[in-house]
Image: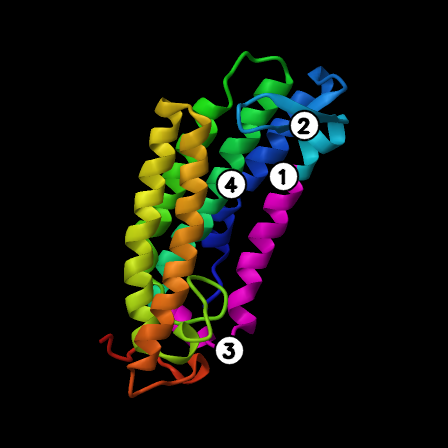
Amino acid sequence: MAWSWRREAILLVPVVAMFITSAVAWPFAEEPFPVHWDAAGEADRYGGKFEGLMVLPIVALGTAVLMVGLPFVDPGRRNYASFLSTYNLIRGATLLFLAGLHVLLVSIGLGADLDITLFIYPAIGLLFLVLGNVMSKIRPNFFAGIRTPWTLSSARSWTATHRLGGWMFMAIGVGFLAMAIVQAAWFLIALLVANLTAIVLLFAYSYVVWRDDPDRVPVSQTTPTEPSP
């Protein structure tokens, strides 16, 4: 994957914004600082200012650095060129999600009267919708996408599984958007069950497609120009 300072600078904007937000909020933050919320949106654990203001930005920075480096050590690294824009969109969406979450949590920690569930569930839903929309564009690799022993050894299984996974991700995203309206514990449980069911189905589906593929090829031997079945 070709390195671009301009691209990396743009993708780091959400991370920088998180650190700036923490720096601005630091003098006004008081301890104990809320650092964890239950499913009902009630704070159930408190910590110090450093934990409340700095841990998430540090996690985001680590995530940003990790997502830059992974393609360079991936055995399927040559495939990244064929879905680079998709990979960058995934990186950007992930960092924007973390930045939005950080602003929300800091605002609540400083005393803003906000219902976290009205923001966090739609944010998760939007992230799933974005990921689901681009899922089918991800090409074989070891770090991004649905990686099972069978998608990693069959281009056909990879393609079919990601197409199905994209629809499942978008359906789950709609479910999380609806959660902000329904606001019921049973609905959240149903969403978690749906997530687990999707994982099991995709795992099994990737095997079924792989089993019927006469041209199984390890991901390290695939090429960006390999035709999709």
Structural distance between the alpha carbons of marks 2 and 4 = 15 Å
Residue 126 locus on image (x, y percent) = 37, 38
Which residue in the structure is indicated by mark 3? 75
Residue 43 visible from this viewpoint? yes
- Are there few (<14), some (14-19), or many (20+) residues within 10 Å of tag 4? some
Structural distance between the alpha carbons of marks 1 and 2 = 11 Å
Task: Indicate which disc, 2 or 3, sits on the residue closer to the N terminus.
Answer: 2
Which residue in the structure is indicated by mark 1? 57
Residue 224 visible from this viewpoint? no
Task: Indicate which disc, 2 or 4, sits on the residue closer to the N terminus.
Answer: 4
User: Which amino acid, mark 4?
Assistant: Val
Read off the magenta span: 56-81
Taking the magenta stretch, the answer to whether it contains residue 19 is no
User: Which amino acid, mark 3?
Assistant: Pro
Which residue in the structure is indicated by mark 4? 13
Magenta residues, dominant SS class: helix
Task: Indicate which disc, 3 or 1, sits on the residue closer to the N terminus.
Answer: 1
User: Which amino acid, mark 1?
Assistant: Pro
Q: Residue at image x 63%, y 22%?
A: 43
Structural distance between the alpha carbons of marks 3 and 4 = 29 Å
Task: Indicate which disc, 4 or 1, sits on the residue closer to the N terminus.
Answer: 4
Residue 74 locus on image (x, y percent) = 52, 73
Q: Residue at image x 58%, y 51%?
A: 63
Secondary element under disc 1, as helix, strand or loop, is: helix
Badges 2 and 3: C-beta atoms under 8 Å apart? Answer: no
Task: Indicate which disc, 1 or 2, sits on the residue closer to the N terminus.
Answer: 2
Secondary element under disc 3, as helix, strand or loop, is: loop
> Which one is in front, 220 or 208?
208
> Which one is in front, 207 or 34?
207
Which residue in the structure is indicated by mark 2? 23
Secondary element under disc 4, as helix, strand or loop, is: helix
